[in-house]
Image: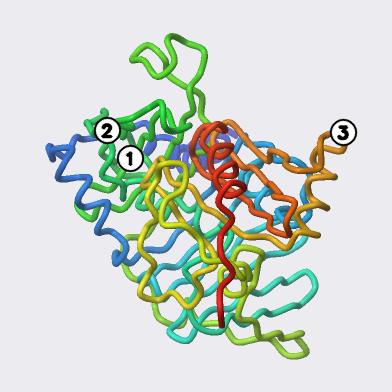
Amino acid sequence: MAEPTWRWGAVAAGVAALMALPALAGALPARDSGRSAEELLAKVRASGTVGWSGYGESRGTLVLPDVRELSDLGDLVGGTTRVRAWWRGPREWRVNALSLVGETDTTRDRGGGWTWHSADRRALRLVGDLDVRLPAAADLLAPTLGRRLAGTEDVTVRRLPARRVAGMSAAGLRLVPRQPALTTVHRVDLWVEPDSGLPLQVEVRVPGHGGAEGGETDEGEIALQAGLLEVDLAPPAQERTRFSPPARAQVTRVDAPDLAAAADRFAPYVLPDELAGLPRRPRSALSVGGGVGTYGDGFTAVALVPLPEDLARSIIRRVDPGGNAEQAAVSTPLVSGLIGRDGRGRAFLAAGTVPPSTLSAALAQLRVTPPARRTR
């Protein structure tokens, strides 16, 4: 009986070794690339054209009030989102957000994009380009989130120790706002593939209670994090990013798929060139709207979204039923939001990674100097 026992022992040992391979790979020491912080930051900013595919997760600790019009956003920033993605470039990608009841499949192509909800077999065709919309699962992938956060010039940057992410050595970067009093972002830590600059892991922190606010002794608290657990740094085949509606799917064509996109296209106001001391950012070359304004830059950016007054009144009553019905906060430690009415038929949502006082100043300015109506 000794020989069979020996054989089964060998099989068990082999299986145990195979099961341990992922853990062993993660335990291997990370090698530092030797690249400077400035060199890595430039690579991150240029990484949008890097082809890749993989599986990742994002986690948020940001609890938004119960606002139906922003319900999908609350799910993104206040829980765990699991996605599988194929990325050929900024205008050719596919992201599957996975859940217990099905998946939401979002694709981008030269003519626009598709959103597929498998649970109720609904396909939404987005016609053309939109440079204004609410965030989606694709925006919280580590590569897209990291690249966007690295786009601002108003930061200091330094190296962090390398760590292993998705089975590979990732170089570390820390971005700290130059004007911490003007933003709710304490710092952003990135770990990137050093040759391509592709962000593999992102941590966004808000001021914590470990020391003087904004100081070196304050580690901050993680408000949002995203990481890739599996990644292939080869461009996926083109068919992986294509989508065709399945048979008997309900197909709808839209030009403005959400609240922000609709406001951008149809809002009736001419927004100011400066808001609460922040200059308005130039519109994208792809822009077809103009009704939504973005002010400031990087970590001090504010979006101004005109709202129908009846919608604003309804949201204010739900968020702050005991308030004055003129304004209500829809905020988290990272993203401040304020909805306000001016009593003359105008209403706005102002939101950004800025202190609430900045948004209050913005709405006060709009009440004193109401935006003129646009002519079409």
Tag 1: Cα neighbours inside 10 Å, few (<14), some, or many (≥20)?
A: many
Q: What residue do we see at 70% from left, 56% from top?
A: 99
Query: Would residue 319 be visible to someone looking at this image?
Result: yes
Q: CA distance from mark 1 to mark 3?
A: 45 Å
Q: Is residue 3 visible?
A: no
Mark 3, Cα crowd under 10 Å, few <14 / some 14-19 / many 20+, is few
Mark 2–mark 1 CB contact (< 8 Å): yes
> 362 or 132: which is nearer to us?
362
Q: Earlier in the sequence, mark 3 or mark 2?
A: 2
Viewed as shown, does residue 147 lie left or right of 94?
Answer: left
* Circle 3: residue type: Gly
Q: What separation in Å lies between label 3 and label 2 (alpha carbons)? A: 50 Å
Q: Position of residue 39 (x, y in %)?
A: 14, 45
The residue beneath circle 3 is: 322
> Mark 2 or mark 1: which is in front?
1
Q: Which mark's residue is nearer the viewer, 1 or 3?
A: 3
Q: Secondary structure at mark 2?
A: strand
Give the residue displayed 58% in from the left and 80% down from the top: 126
Give whichever of discs 1 and 3 has the lower sequence position: 1
**Callout 1 secondary element:** strand
Q: Quadrant of the N terminus?
A: top right
Q: Is residue 300 left or right of residue 60?
A: left
Which image quadrant for residue 253?
Answer: bottom right
According to the image, label 1 marks what residue?
191
Q: Which mark is residue 162?
A: 2
Label 2 is placed on what type of residue? Ala
